[in-house]
Amino acid sequence: EPEVTQTPSHQVTQMGQEVILRCVPISNHLYFYWYRQILGQKVEFLVSFYNNEISEKSEIFDDQFSVERPDGSNFTLKIRSTKLEDSAMYFCASKTLRGRSNSPLHFGNGTRLTVT
Amino acid sequence: AQKVTQAQTEISVVEKEDVTLDCVYETRDTTYYLFWYKQPPSGELVFLIRRNSFDEQNEISGRYSWNFQKSTSSFNFTITASQVVDSAVYFCALISNTGNQFYFGTGTSLTVIP
C-alpha cells in the first residue's frame, strides 16, 4: 500500500538554525498538508498546499515557515530560525482529489524536531 | 467554526473489557465528514474510519464499532474485548464539505492493562 514518507525521523537543531523537513506524499495525491503535535498535545494544522500554492494556513504558520514542492515528488517544510517552542512532531499528510473532502488524510510517520 | 471535543483525556481498562471513546463535534455545515485516527506509542497517525454526515448508519469492523448520532453531534468509538495492542491515543477529527482543513480533538489516551 502506498504511503507518505518523511525524513528524517528525528532532527535535533540549535535555536536560530534553519531546518528543512522533507516529505514524499503518495504519488497520485493532489493535496498536501503539514500538521504538528507538541508532545502530549493535540494535532494542529499548519498549512495546506494544492496546485503549487498554499491554499490555507493557520496562525501558527507565520513568516518563519515556508513550504515548497521543488519537484514532482517532494514536499518540504522550512523553518527559517527555529525557536525552542518549535520542538514538536511534524506530520506530513496527503489526500486525493480536491473537493473530495471525505477523503481521509494519509499521514507520514512524522519528524520529531528537537530545538535546543 | 468547527470544533471537536474529546472530554476523556485518559482511560484505563483491563484487557478484554469493552471501552467507549467519546467524540462530540460542532459545525455549522450540513455536510461534513468525521474520522477516527489511532496514534500508537510509535507516534504515527493511522486512519481508522471515515463517516459522512448524511449516513448515520453505525459501523462495525471486527472489534471496533462506531456510533454516529447527529441529534447529539456525537461520533463515539467502541472497542470490544480490548487488547494490549489497542493501547494508543485516539483522535477524532472533522472536516466540512466546504473546508480543506481537518480539525482534531485533543485525543484520548487509552491504556489496556494485561
Image (cartoon, rainbow, N blue to C red):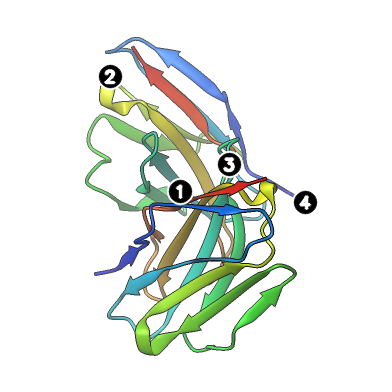
Chain letter of disc 4? A
Q: Residue at x 46, y 48 (%)?
A: A33
Q: Which residue is mark 2?
A: A81
Q: Which residue is mark 3?
A: B44
User: Which of the 4 image quarters holds residue A82?
Assistant: top left
Q: Earlier in the sequence, mark 1 or mark 2?
A: 1
Q: Nearer the viewer, mark 4 or mark 3?
A: 3
Amino acid carrying mark 1 in the image: Tyr
Q: Nearer the viewer, mark 1 or mark 3?
A: 3
As rendered, which of B103 and A2 lies closer to the eye? B103
| Residue A83 coordinates in the image, percent (x, y) | 26, 21
Q: Are marks 3 and 2 in contact (CB under 8 Å)?
A: no
**Furthest residue to the right?**
A1
Mark 3 and mark 2: Cα distance apart in space = 26 Å
Q: Which residue is mark 4?
A: A1
Q: Is the residue marked by circle 1 packed among few (<14), some (14-19), or many (20+) residues within 10 Å? A: many
Q: Earlier in the sequence, mark 2 or mark 4?
A: 4
What secondary structure is found at the residue carrying circle 1?
strand
Mark 4 and mark 3: Cα distance apart in space = 16 Å
